[in-house]
Amino acid sequence: MKKLFVLVLCMAAMTGMVFAEGSGEYPERDITNVMVWGAGGGTDTCNRVVMPEMAKELGVNINVVNNPGGVAGSVGMAAAFAKDPDGYTICGLSESCVTSAVMGGFPERMNVWDFFIIGGSPDIVSVTPDAPYNSIEELVKAAKANPGSIRAGASGAGSIHHLNLLAFEKGAGVEFNFIPYDGSAPAQNAAMTGEITLVITSVAEQAQLIRGGKLRPLGMLVPEAFELGDTKIPSAFDAYPSMSEFLPISQAIGFAIRKDADKKIKSKLTNAFQVAMNSEAVIEFGKKNYYILSGKSGAEANKVFDSLESNFGWTLQELGAAKVDPASLGIPKP
């Protein structure tokens, strides 16, 4: 009986030790950022700049792991969402992911996440350097002459760049041959090699390629012209004012954590995020790479993504590109 009592005490002590070891303050180990887009794109680059600054504040590493594929980042989102909401898995994503449900990818609406917005950059229409187009008007004229003959690339179906391509088609009254890619970098590489003629990604993603003569910019998909060094890029709205019916649509690059994660975990991440966004490294990165930094989190960031989901979902529905009726998902009209 005495031996049994001692054994029970030992087991209780061991259980207490295990509990104590596992009940320290978050985070106790490295965090994984599941990136829904491919390496080298804007979302990937922004996250890889911000994560090290957050890691300094949290005292652990944050490892960015690319998991692209599916519709509008659905493969990476599903992988991240399948993990426990313990704060050790976050999801690197962007505004393009809000179309995943209406495009038949991710089965949940975006309101299952809490968001952290790093920032964004406006989209631009560019062509491969040897393309016979020196203006947006010349491109549109050729596209109208041979509908569907010009190969146009962007990140996956339902992404902001794909949505901007659809809006460009509607606004200019043309039809391109859309080729989807697993992120902006592969799409841009395809344009540089001549695999496609036209690419739509952001200024931040194209800036170095334009400077190096590897892409030729034709027009901005925002109402204002843009100056990139000595190059002034006109707005496509000047030639085709009807684009204002569908554009502009702003980027919201960042990351998210499952909404059902503990409030203390979210608080730690929010604090680290704000420290990172105010760091010299991130501020300098934004200036040099044409990003408009945000720093929104919590209810403020969630409101942005709610609005984007509504805007993108119903725009795709009106453009005839949605696979699932947004009304059936409970997504309100803008």
Image (spheres, rainbow, N blue to C red):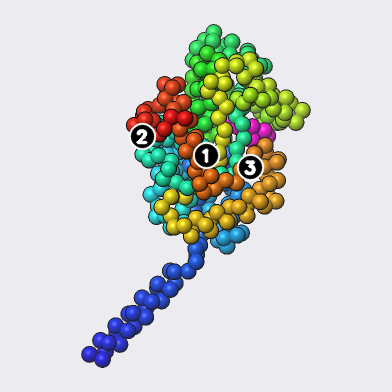
Q: Secondary structure at mark 2?
A: helix
Mark 3 near mark 2, Cβ–Cβ under 8 Å?
A: no
Magenta highlight on residue 234: no
In the rendered image, the residue lying farthest to the right is: 230
Q: Residue 329: give its label.
A: 2
Residue positioned 67% across, 39% down in the render: 289
Q: Measure how far apart labels 3 and 1 are at the Cα level.
A: 14 Å
x then y, percent, for residue 100: 42, 35
Q: In front here: 160 or 242? A: 242
Q: Measure how far apart labels 3 and 2 are at the Cα level.
A: 31 Å
Residue indicated by mark 3: 293
x then y, percent, for residue 103: 40, 31
Q: In front here: 240 or 184? A: 240
x then y, percent, for residue 271: 57, 56
**Kind of residue at badge 2:** Leu
Q: Secondary structure at mark 1?
A: helix
Q: Is residue 2 left or right of residue 52?
A: left
Q: Is residue 283 left or right of residue 193?
A: right
Q: Which residues are magenta?
A: 201-208
Q: Mainly helix, strand or loop, the magenta region?
A: helix
Q: Is residue 222 above or below residue 238?
A: below
> Few, some or many C-alpha atoms within 10 Å of disc 1 (few <14, some 14-19, many ≥20)?
some
x then y, percent, for residue 180: 48, 28
Residue indicated by mark 1: 304
Q: Quadrant of the N terminus?
A: bottom left
Residue positioned 58% across, 52% down in the render: 273
Residue positioned 49% across, 43% down in the render: 302
